[in-house]
Image (cartoon, helix red, strand yellow):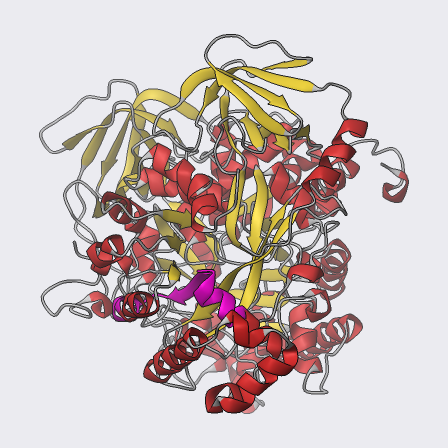
Amino acid sequence: MNYTKILFSAALIFNIYTVEAKSIVIKNAMIYDGINDNAFSGNILIEDGLIKKVSQSSIQGDTVIDAEGKIVTPGFIASDTEIGIVEIGALSVTRDDQSSIYSIGFSIHDAFNPNSTLIPWNRSNGITSAITLPRNTSSPIGGLGSFFSLNGSLQIDSEQDIAMIGRIGGSSSSSRSEMLALTDDILSFASTLNNKSMKSNLDINQIIDDSSLADYLELKPRDVKALYRLINEKLPLIIKANRASDILKLLELKKKYNLNLIIIGAQEASLVAKEISTSNTPLIVNPTNNIPGSFDELASNINLSSRLEKEGIRLMFNASRDHNYHLIRQGAGIAVANGMSYGGAIRALTSNVAKSFNIANRGEIKPGNIADIVIWEADPLEPSSMPEKVFINGVDMDLTTRSTRLRDRYIKNLDKPNTYRD
Amino acid sequence: MKNYKKLKITTLFTILLSFVNISSAYNAVPFESTYVPMPHTNTLFRGANIYDGEGNEFLDTDLLIKDGKIIALGKDLPASSEFTVVDASGKWITPGIIDIHSHMGVYSAPGVTTSSDGNESTSPVTADVWAEHSIWVQDPQFALALKGGVTSFHVLPGSANLIGGRGVTAKNLQRNTINSMKFPNAPHSLKMACGENPKRVYGNRSQAPSTRMGNIAGYRKSWIKAEAYLSRLDEYESKSDEAKELGYKPTRDLELETLAGVLRGEILIQNHCYRAEEMAMMIDIANEFGYKITAFHHAVEAYKIADLLAENNICAAMWSDWWGFKHEAYDMVQANVAIVDQAKNGTGCAIVHSDDAIGIQHLNQEASKALSAGLKAGFEITKARAMKWITSNPAKAAGIYDQTGSLKVGKNADVVLWSKNPFSVYALAEKVYIDGAKAFDKEAGIEPSSDFDIGIMNPNKNRIQE
């Protein structure tokens, strides 16, 4: 794995200065650990930003927080977001999600803004980290997403370029058959790449010159390097597809090129659930989306998550519309209301994301993992209940948001003019 | 909201009829509702927990519906053989949910260009167009909304234009003509839009409006024309029959007819408006020309002027937490709905709307989020009161409160039986009644499917049939 190493040690040093106590114990927690189906009552020891111990017997610590039997989960990991690279959807000047020069190798990583208002907002909703993806381009595959911790630190805690995105489906400009053929051709080209012949950009430019496809697509060395990683490092390839027949074609490509495929959308997945299950392909679905929004999504059904879970498919959740990533919780609740297991829904928000994207040491409450932990005031899948405490890297995070500040400005100290209120 | 009580729908409709008759040489009123309820079931719901949509909660209480109307609500109501008894113990009953802001039918599913009929964005003022003329009655989204407990909904044109056209209220019973879905005696609305959308759409064409000040000028110019038209109309109508025959009859103008209908108080203004200062300006314009704004829609910044809205008896229709998709949606606070509700000693009119084919299926959950945020902000609001945000308040804003929106005796039996408390994400609508007729029954497998759903994936099945 060639990930940029997370600035974890820097974060730890920072923590030591900001947190007085060296160890924190969360006691009397009802723990959904992101592993087991059922919750268990227990205590959690956090030290040096890590989960040190999870035990049913009592633990000593510098600071003890009594969860009073409330539900405690791993911090949720949003699997499909634009957090940090889009501040306001309709304002292109605040969007850093596309490139007109790079295609397959376009990385959004360096655009990440830890001061984005979306970070405290999502954190206050129990989302402690996120995968941020670029916008789909006209190319059927292309663009690299990264993983970010939502601690808001300018010392960005990330894993760079952990997944490539793509899209297959109905289009007003070209046949899906063309998209599939082009995907096949790009993957075929990617399969010919080997590290020895890619020592310098000069070498890579030679490879591009020698390939009519690479030349036609005007690939740059960054693009070719990304393709090399896709095949040789088994980089997760997240393809957006909905129609059942498209999903089957993607499973064929997965087999042919030994891809680490993740399908996103997958509105008709229940029609080909057995095949998806057999191929061990994880899916990112929106459990609230039962709209036949296009002719690719005719089988859309509110029970999608439940049906896929029964086939043993690993699920993750997303939400429609930008800025609404916090709705994955409500989506998970709706999935449970329509037949999915509760433990499965929690995993879809936590460990399933970590596993599918090879994010080390997150998504589960177990010793050795990073202490991204949420104490919920009530059931986390009820959208009316909010986190009471959120820990990221073991730090008890402030849950103030711009939204709560604005609220307070208009309900408190009303005797002063609004601009002189807090 | 008290104003609505004065608007007797029947008188209003008579005025509307006479108005159209005078301006036309012919007598047929076009596009009238031809709605006929489905056969009703006289039903006794036994031992339910009830939110009545008026702000009250009743536990372990019976509800009786007969001949399509609510006839009694109380403990231990006597059963007789003419009633089907539904054991509702441990379950919850609410009035049918009403969405004041929907684009179902005008932005149908699948979302294809050939059915994208919500914005007549060819001119910034299109008061002459009516949303109902765009509605594709086979939109599969209606049935999905029904399963979310929605019994009536208001369809508006989009927000590309300053004045976008008339909105229509429909019963959520899919029929093969729109007239047969139209809510009987419901007034039309007129969609207006503030802010970014009109100025973007027309500004991009180097046409007015390209600024917010251009927006304001655009509305005022239209109302000046409408005033002139109305005075010509009033003058003509005040003449004796003989004088009418001799005199000049004002030529009908579809655009000005709609605007004049607003000035006469017959057509209700539904105003897309996010920002506080723009809502305040729209109130000024309404006062300048003597019309009333019924509701501001989306109203992300309503919390900043909640008292002003309450003083003017204007509802705000809001999302619980959508934000950030554009600049004017940046200042979202989750307590927005609650702050509007609590304004001026709780006289505010708050509505939770969807503007979305998924959101409309979960308005109960949206209300739940808004309530939770209100409680966190320190307000004391009951669930029973919050239920008004998706029932009686939108009914008032649609001008149909005398007929539906709460479980008052005599009103239409638009009723939802929920598996659990509807403020929970796990609650599902089990049975939905419209005018006392069972439109959806999860257990009995009664649910509508549009023509679109038939045989589209498998010739022998419906679209989402298992």
Looking at the image, which is closer to me, B349 or A309? Answer: A309
Decide which of A391, B326 is in the foreground and name it.
A391
Left or right of B146? Residue B131 is: right
The spot of residue A147 in percent (x, y) is 58, 51
Residue A153 in the image: x percent, y percent?
74, 43
Looking at the image, how many numbered discs can be counted on the residues? 0
Q: Position of residue A366 (x, y in %)?
A: 48, 27
Give me the residue at 69% from left, 57% from top: A112
Is residue A237 a member of the stretch shown in magenta? Answer: yes
- Residues shaded magenta: A226-248
Question: Where is residue B339 drawn, in percent x and y?
Answer: 66, 38
Depth order, front residue of B394/B231? B394
Position of residue A199 relative to residue A232, above or below, is below
Residue A203 appears left or right of B432: right
Q: Is residue A46 above or below residue A228?
A: above
Please say if A294 is above or below A83: below
Q: Quadrant of the C terminus of chain A?
A: top right
Q: Quadrant of residue B192?
A: bottom right
- Indicate whether residue A136 is drawn in magenta: no
The answer to whether one can see residue B157 in this image is: no
Toward which corner of the image does residue B195 lie, by quadrant? bottom right
Q: Is residue B328 above or below residue A78?
A: below
Residue A182 visible here: yes
In the image, is A90 to the left or to the right of A360? right
